[in-house]
Amino acid sequence: MGDDTTGVRDETHRGGFGDLGGEERGLIDRSFRERIIAVGFVEEGKNEASIKLELEELCRLIDTAGADVVEIVIQRRSSPDPATYIGRGKAREIYDMAESLDIDTVVFNDELTPGQQFNLEKIFHRSALDRTAVILDIFAQNASTPEGKAQVELAQLQYRLPRLKGQGRNYSQQAGGIGTRGPGETKLEVDRRRLVRRVHKLQRQLRAVGSHRRNQSKRRRRSYNQSVAIVGYTNAGKSTLLNLLADSDSVVADRLFATLDPLTRRIQLPGGESIFVTDTVGFVQKLPHQLIEAFKTTLDVVIEADLLLHIVDCSHASPETQIKAVRSVLEEIGAGDIPEILVFNKADRSDPSELLMLYPDSVAISSYTGAGIDKLLSAVADQLRVVWDVVELAIPFDRGEVLAQVHREGQVLTENVTEDGMLIQARLDSSSRSRLAPFLVLERGRDEI
């Protein structure tokens, strides 16, 4: 395919999505709402419906970042152009459109290579961003804790490093003496070295945070009960559900990626057991790999969970697409084998009956009205009881070391004082059960609970 778009079908949708509203925050830290052209790419013969859904989501991302989409362009080609992604002919057409509509930035639905971005900016005479840059910008705006800010900064630096541009010898440092003659170190090399140092520093900080978080998790698991992680597509209602379950104060907003930092709360199940429930960062289609890498310490709470509550917005145009996107990220972080319960949220907005038939073990709720919450808690209790074995132990008052062992090796559910000692209900692994066999009163296995 040549540099122009001759012989290739293309389409421009006039009018776009208009002013989508939102807060007064610029896409790249400006005090006004930028005017954006959103560009999608469709390879010939591919399904266009999914691309249009992605473009709708891109427009929501841009609105969340604080800018307005005033035009949407879809380019069809047999394959992406290595130099400009969309072909020089289409790029010149977008330049003319941007000039006439007073456009500030052109945003692409797919990730651009550094070379493509550089070439497009030369043609457009304005910024050319991709979906990854928009998501990173949103994360930067929403990060509030030191850990969240460090994670976002690391992702941004990893994205920027291959995109550094310099002017060669015009920025070179002069040097003298044997072995130092020549152009010296360019400003580009200095900038890259500084960024690499900063990346390494942030990685060390986040490793320390991850180690501390794992220690907290170990102490929590030894002292109390199992953990449940709430996962799902961004804006599916995860934080609203946590607030409802635990009477919590997690940030709730009708926008994408409102929650970045994990929030853990303790709740009680219908059978009396207490568990920890953690709200996590939302996922999205084409979630940047840099973010997944940077947020590994945060996503560890998902990997270490005993059960996942996979929240799905049943009112969305394509819930199955969101389910696939979330499961793809779970596989990437190593959480694909953790048991999950599909929870179709926002049942007050849309009838989930077809989805419940398609996914028989799922649950429908409304975290806004509270409908279905009792059924969800029962499903969580049943699932957790299947995962673990529960035993009862009678420990005499004079065997304090045994009581300490149970707390150290298991998860204590209940403790009751009797005439002869302590009656404890706990979850233990097979080796601990063997060591504590003399004190077992009743073992309730997986088939008995």
Image: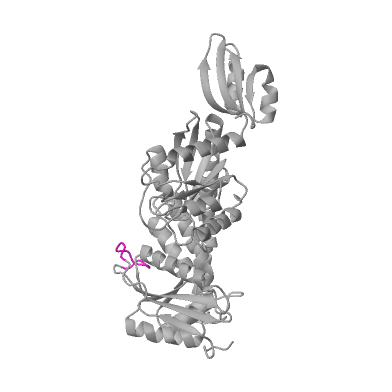
Name the image colouring: one colour
Q: Is residue 360 left or right of residue 129?
A: right
In the image: residue 220, left or right of residue 256: right
Residue 29 picture quarter: bottom left
**Residue found at x 52% / y 31%:** 224
Residue 40: percent from the left, percent from the top?
48, 75
- In which quadrant will I find the N terminus? bottom right
Q: Is residue 25 magenta?
A: yes
In x, y percent, where is residue 329? 56, 56
> Residue sitting at 39 percent across and 56 percent down?
142
Q: 291 or 215: nearer the eye?
A: 291
- Work out which quarter of the rendered image holds the C terminus and state it: top right
Q: Can the viewer see residue 240 in this picture?
A: yes
> Is any part of residue 173 visible from this angle?
no
Q: Which residue lies furthest to the top in this view?
A: 419
**For residue 258, above or below residue 217:** below
Q: Nearer the viewer, residue 424 or 206?
A: 424
Q: Where is residue 285 in the image (x, y as percent from the top left)?
A: 51, 62
Residue 165 locus on image (x, y percent): 49, 75
Q: Is residue 258 magenta?
A: no
Read off the magenta span. Answer: 21-30
Please tell me which residue lies in front, 245 or 146.
Answer: 245
